[in-house]
Every structure is written in structure tokens, then in C-alpha cells.
């Protein structure tokens, strides 16, 4: 199984009954990485995603900067793996995803349009609940088989926000492995490498633009820094991942 199947299969083992997030004045905090860590050094509540046939895994750890702020750091050397956190809520209620990230560098051989180039210094996934009423008979049969094998359905769709290697910012395109994962280049290239960048996306609107329908419930958030296809080395970092109501998002602009 290639690590790109994160969006359709690898999450199955971790998407049981997803825990809800507590509302803080219109904000659902996924993680600011200030909480407990596991014995392996991972943020508590996140599960590792390893993929068949990929022996080298991205190394994730919680670190602190010079101001004692905690964040999630990821290092990949010809490696791939992800982290996923379960959650469940209606995107219509909290449509805006906010986070900040930074990277060491993009990947020289990275190319979002090919399987051989499907590597990124940083990406953030939002995964959506499977609804059999939205798919045809053949897809239903495939999802039913996946459920029998793994005990849970894969996500119906995934919105994937990437720090692209060379795409124009704002480019929408399907993942090279599956059109159920629609990507958008939020940042691109090395001009701002090494810099923390605050991002905000209306995932509700992005989903409708990508898939042409109303979204199902959110069932999980994942991050991944991967370089297994290109064989290169880079790092990424993530922090302050949260979903906002439209009102809460407007408050940030005031």
C-alpha cells in the first residue's frame, strides 16, 4: 500500500467513533501541541500512519522554540508516514480551518501531477465521512470490501492542503493516486521556507468547489511530511490547528 492511500484506506484503523472537540467561543482546537506527549514523543491523541512497502518513516516530535512555544516537527529522509487525529463535527458549523506551518525546503524532484513526484515538505488533510448514498454501486462494493477487511469505512473524500514544490498558489488538482483526494497549493516554492506562515481556508467552500456537493461530516485531521518517492530530505513543522465558525474567523480580522 502506497502512503498516498492515506486518504482512502490508511485511516480506517483510526476512524472508529471519533471524539468531538470542545468549542471555545467558536473555535474547535485540534491541537496547539502544548499538551501531553506519549512515550514515543508524539502528541497525545495523534496516531501514526505507516504504509506497506515503505520501511523508512518520517520522524515526528514535539519541540519548543526560543519563546517556549510547542509545535510539531517532522523530518523525512527518503521516508514517509503521517499522523492523524480523530474528530467529528459538521463542517457547515465550523467551516474555516486555521493553522500555521513552515518548511526547510521544497523538493527538487517533487511534482504534484505525477506519482513519482507526489512528495511534500508539509501537507494538512481534512477527511470526510463515507456516505453510500453519494456513490455508485461499484464504489459501494469497494467500500464494503474495505469495511470487511478493516472494520471501518475509508473516508469518502479528503481535502489536502499542500506546500507545493512548484505549482502556482491556488492551484486545485486531484492527487496523483486518487481523485477522492483533492489538493490545493496553499504555499509553493522556497521563497518563504524557514518562516512560520499563518494559514486560513474555508474548507466548506473548498469542498464544494472540489467535489460539487455538500460535505459530509469531518471525521479526522492528518498531517504528513514525505519524501519517499523523490528520495530527498526535508523537514516541516505544524502548529495551532483549529476550526472556526465564520464569526470567530471574522474576529481574527478585527
Image: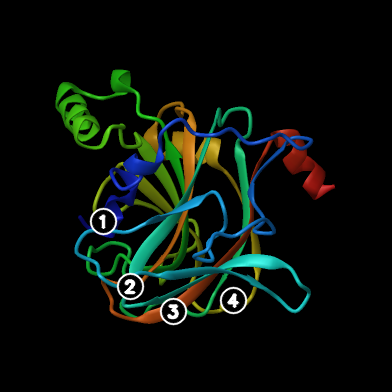
Q: In the rendered image of this protein, does residue 104 appear above or below residue 155?
A: below
Spatial separation of the CA atoms under disc 4 and disc 1: 25 Å
Spatial separation of the CA atoms under disc 3 and disc 1: 21 Å
Residue 227 spot, x, y in % from top left: 34, 73
Q: Earlier in the sequence, mark 2 or mark 1?
A: 2
Q: In the rendered image of this protein, does residue 251 appear above or below residue 59?
A: above
Q: Are marks 3 and 1 in contact (CB under 8 Å)?
A: no
**Mark 3 or mark 4, which is nearer to you?**
3
Mark 1 lies on a secondary structure that is loop
**Mark 2 or mark 1, which is nearer to you?**
2
Q: Earlier in the sequence, mark 3 or mark 1?
A: 1
Mark 2 lies on a secondary structure that is loop
Mark 4 lies on a secondary structure that is loop
Total count of labels: 4
Spatial separation of the CA atoms under disc 4 and disc 2: 23 Å
Quadrant (top left/top right/bottom left/bottom right) for the N terminus:
bottom left
Question: What label does residue 192 carry, if any?
Answer: 4
Question: What label does residue 176 carry, if any?
Answer: 1
Spatial separation of the CA atoms under disc 3 and disc 4: 14 Å
Q: Which residue is mark 2?
A: 79
**Most distant residue in the right direction:** 254
Q: Earlier in the sequence, mark 3 or mark 4?
A: 4
Q: Earlier in the sequence, mark 4 or mark 1?
A: 1
Q: Earlier in the sequence, mark 2 or mark 3?
A: 2
Spatial separation of the CA atoms under disc 2 and disc 1: 18 Å
State the residue at coordinates (47%, 35%).
219
Left or right: where 99 falls relative to 169: right
Question: What label does residue 234 carry, if any?
Answer: 3
Residue 164 spot, x, y in % from top left: 43, 66
Left or right: where 91 falls relative to 47: right
Amino acid at each position: 500500500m502506497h502512503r498516498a492511500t492515506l486518504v482512502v484506506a490508511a485511516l480506517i484503523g483510526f476512524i472508529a467513533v471519533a471524539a468531538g472537540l470542545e468549542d471555545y467561543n467558536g473555535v474547535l482546537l485540534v491541537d496547539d501541541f502544548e499538551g501531553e506527549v506519549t512515550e514515543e514523543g508524539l502528541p497525545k491523541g495523534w496516531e501514526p500512519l505507516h504504509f506497506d512497502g515503505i520501511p523508512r518513516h518520517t520522524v515526528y516530535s514535539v519541540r519548543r522554540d526560543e519563546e517556549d512555544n510547542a509545535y510539531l516537527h517532522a523530518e523525512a529522509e527518503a521516508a514517509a508516514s503521517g499522523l492523524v487525529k480523530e474528530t467529528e463535527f459538521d463542517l457547515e458549523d465550523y467551516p474555516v480551518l486555521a493553522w500555521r506551518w513552515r518548511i526547510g525546503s521544497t523538493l527538487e524532484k517533487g511534482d504534484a501531477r505525477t506519482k513519482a513526484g507526489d512528495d511534500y515538505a508539509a501537507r494538512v488533510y481534512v477527511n470526510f465521512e463515507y456516505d453510500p448514498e453519494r456513490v455508485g454501486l461499484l464504489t459501494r462494493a469497494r467500500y464494503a470490501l474495505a469495511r470487511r477487511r478493516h472494520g471501518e469505512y475509508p473516508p469518502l473524500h479528503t481535502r489536502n492542503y499542500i506546500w507545493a514544490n512548484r505549482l502556482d498558489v491556488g492551484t486545485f488538482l486531484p492527487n496523483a493516486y486518487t481523485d477522492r483526494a483533492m489538493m490545493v497549493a496553499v504555499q509553493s516554492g522556497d521563497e518563504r521556507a524557514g518562516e512560520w506562515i499563518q494559514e486560513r481556508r474555508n474548507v466548506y467552500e473548498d469542498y464544494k468547489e472540489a467535489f460539487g456537493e455538500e460535505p459530509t461530516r469531518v471525521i479526522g485531521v492528518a498531517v504528513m511530511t514525505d519524501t519517499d518517492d523523490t528520495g530527498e530530505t526535508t523537514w516541516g513543522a505544524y502548529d495551532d490547528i483549529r476550526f472556526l465558525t465564520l464569526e470567530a474567523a471574522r474576529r481574527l480580522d478585527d
